Amino acid sequence: MEIKFKRNFLSLAIMFATASAPTVYAQVDEKSTDSVDTNSQVVEEVVVTGSRIKRANLETASPITSVSAEDIELSGNISLGDYLNELPALRSTFSNNNSGRFIGTVGLNLLDLRGMGYERTLVLQDGRRHIGSSIGTSAVDVNTIPEDLLLRVDTVTGGQSAIYGADAVTGVVNFITRDDFEGLKVNLHHMQPELNGGEATEFSVTWGSNFAEGRGNVAVSFQHSQTAEVYGKDRPWIAASPGYQVNPADTGDDGIPDEILVFNTTNNLLSENGVIWGTHPLTTIYGYPSSYFPLLGSLASGPYTFTNDGQLVAFNPGEHPPGETTSVGGDGLNFISSTQLYPELDSQNYFAKAHYDLNESTRLFVEAKYSVNNAESYGQPSFDYFGDLVISADNAFVPAELKQELDDAGMTEFWYHRFHSDLGMRGDDAKREVQRYVLGIEGDLIGSWSYEAYAVYGQYDAEVDYTNNRHNARFFEAVDAVVDPGTGEIVCRSETARANGCLPINLFGYGLNSQEAIDYFMLQDTGSTENMTQTVFSASVTGDLFELPAGALSTAVGVEYREETSEVDYDQVIKDGETFMNALAPSSGEYDVSEVFFEVSAPLVEGLPGVDSLTLGASARFSDYSTIGATTTWGTSIDWAITEDVRIRATSSEAVRAPNIDELFSPLGQNYFSWEDPCSYDKIDEAPDPAQRAARCAELGVPADFNSVKDASSLSGLSGGNTELKEETAETITYGLAITPRFAPGLVITVDYWDMEITDAIDGIPAQEILERCVDSASINNIYCPLVPRDPSTGEVISLTSPLLNIASLTARGIDYQVDYSFELSELVSSESDWGSLKFSLLGTELLERNDYPFQDNPDDPDEVRGELGDPIRSYTTNVTYYRGDLQINWRSRYIDDMLLIETDQRRDLQDPYKTPSIRYHDLQGRYKFADFEVYGGVNNIEDVEPPVGLSGTGGGSGIYNTLGRNFYLGINYTL
């Protein structure tokens, strides 16, 4: 049969809501779709994302991208969050594969619109707020969203604080669920990568039914998914152990790369079997004379390491240029064994939703959700170097040959540098529970006026266990082994430790210790408990005030109250800093906010040449926070239809983000910073004024020939919240063009320009900035030097403190574009035969600017993010779906532009390669329906494209890449 498309604009918009890729038009709220009567052309007014005003058409001035449930199913991706993070507008800051890079965050899948921070993206469910899953913030874990009842996902670009409140400074992501599900749907889905690890299974059951003669509907859904972990050793691009090494051919700023990509790399400072340094690396890297060796715990006759069974042998540092810690080959540390690319995940979601019409004008609605997500990740083990582990020469496990070397050198102790893989890999085991309940009433008032009132309560609880968390004091007790003169047995030196169960351990080799001995100091039951609550009360009315020449002046007015609480606590040994992990302080806080908001829409002109319609809009929200006081946000818009085929739209808004609980109330806790000491002799000349830097360093007690032994290592320090923080402010403008040509029914083309600037952005002062501003100022009596105290005897930095301040700004500009085209193939050949139909879509973003300003008062010194790893200049997805009867075939392609691996302002000869190549992924799916059963299957990443230049995909930027490799999936749906 021939498929006929309706020619009116409304049916076109509805058709594209279910197209195989997103559409920028706002979509009908599901509860109102039954009201469309295509014969009479009477349409019930509906609410669209980005506005609270009911309207008879689906156009708004805000640029909206929607993905339908069908889009998600066609992707074959079990993880909803991972699918959304592949959209050009969203940055893969926290997807499943890179969520474990911070303490306690494993398993979180957060959305980051425009790459300006997940805390600046507001996530809603059915237009209402949702409890967060990242402690102290409002960031929603997408793993908690009920996927089987999902209708679509709307993404609105630009500040939406006037409509939805704080946090919507870069935009809103709104998950719309169905209101009218009837029947039974059972789904079973399994995905299998071609390589080991990462296999995933999902099972779901959804049931729904109308009742009371259609006056009510109830639906319940259960979903369970499991994903296996992936390790670097099972992926060839990681197993090859890529890394950058100093290029021996480099002579300076000469166009020759300073560093080159090499493989089979090792770190020549450490080993899983242990290293005792010799002339390497203290002389070749840090310039210490050989007379320093005893003082620094090294042996002039070294370096040494040990065989697995404990025999002393010479340490082979591998091939490396002088002063380079990255080697090719050798006995140094290879990080492959501790590289996890994807955590183990287990997720269960229970969701129920119902409504009941008390009469023709009053509806009660209710929702309940319970979600439990488990995630487990493993990373590097504990390790010791740079004097962290000092072993006495009389240690009972010291081999005789080594004891003789120490005696000959006159040393009574030595530094030992070891990566303790055989004692257990450190990990996070997180269990997160989310509850959410909604109760509300909505209905019609007099004339065009209607109302809605609802309450939302959400609760988040989590337990995060830190596995193989070393108790440092107990570890050193176990290392300090001696021979008991009474029994001749090797025991812990401390009698108190022995009484507490200490058993001696032997670190001279690999795998030489019993689990009983390890259990004395390796803790499995330490961790944190987290709790957050959210309470929302909201009420609004909407309707027409009076008639204007082109229609009614419509408005929405409402009030809202919200209260948020957050609390995290740690086991005492962690709070006291007794373990290998950071010393973390408990944190708690709460705030409430009362708000009044309004919105108006004024259709001014219609039916004139060049002005088919012209509508102006305005919105505002007045908020009173218990923490920061009063704030005001606003928005304006224009929607100008030049003809039926061409529409121009524009918005301007000022949005705010109030500081969250974590930013306000988190106490200073231990953190680690990347840094280089600006007072090292080789860094003095890099200063804007070398003489001034040298003078400031001297005033701080740093010797003129100082060369930091800690340089480029992780610097321990403190970071935390600040109760004096104020709100961030975002100013956003958008301009858009939408074309729906009548000569090509089914074709929609849209282009939207957006421009955002966030000022008073909350950020910590970067560690390197603190260090450099301390010594590049006119005096050491500045605000920075007290944050970096130094040891008066050595000149070394002791620690660093980085508090949160409203000091930064962020800017972003770009162009979103989309083409959707849907048609019958028979139309191409003027045939009445059923050739099937085709849907094509192209969705992309061109990033024009993305800058971070660490200090907003210095606009001439931006950190240019555009085009760097994770923020491609150009990215787009293409979808083509073929339909014929019960057959459906989809091809999907995703393009990611090349990206810099270095800072934009750095020399291109800094390293080779200095950027990634462009990447294109191809996916294919087919499905066929047999009566009540639908069978589908596909392959993603058909060409088995690997992350470029050895990237792991576990970083905040490299998470944009596929880490599974080619993978296949098969599924079955049963519907009744």
Image (cartoon, rainbow, N blue to C red):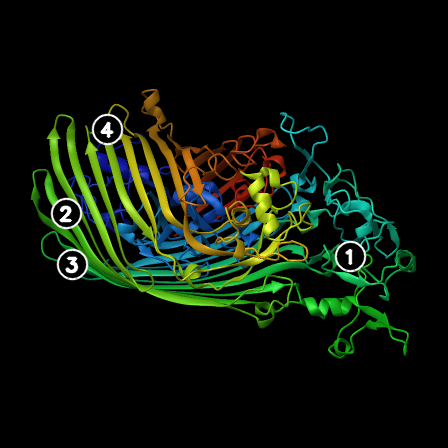
Dot 4 amino acid type: Val
Label 1: few (<14), some (14–19) or many (≥20) C-alpha neighbours in 10 Å: many
Question: What is the quadrant of residue 395 in the picture?
Answer: bottom right
* Mark with earlier residue (1, 2): 1
* Mark with earlier residue (4, 3): 3
> In this picture, is 797 found above or below 737?
below
Query: Which residue in the rendered view is the most extreme toward the top?
Result: 829
Residue under pointer 3: 361
**Residue 364 seen from this side:** no
Labelled pair 3, 2 in contact (Cβ < 8 Å): no
Residue under pointer 2: 554
Labelled pair 3, 1 in contact (Cβ < 8 Å): no
Dot 2 amino acid type: Ser
Real-space CA distance between mark 3 and mark 1, rounded to the nearest whole angstrom: 77 Å
> In this picture, is 22 found above or below 370?
above
* Foreground of the two, 180 or 507: 507
Residue at image position (79%, 66%) is 505
Residue 523 percent coordinates (x, y): 66, 68
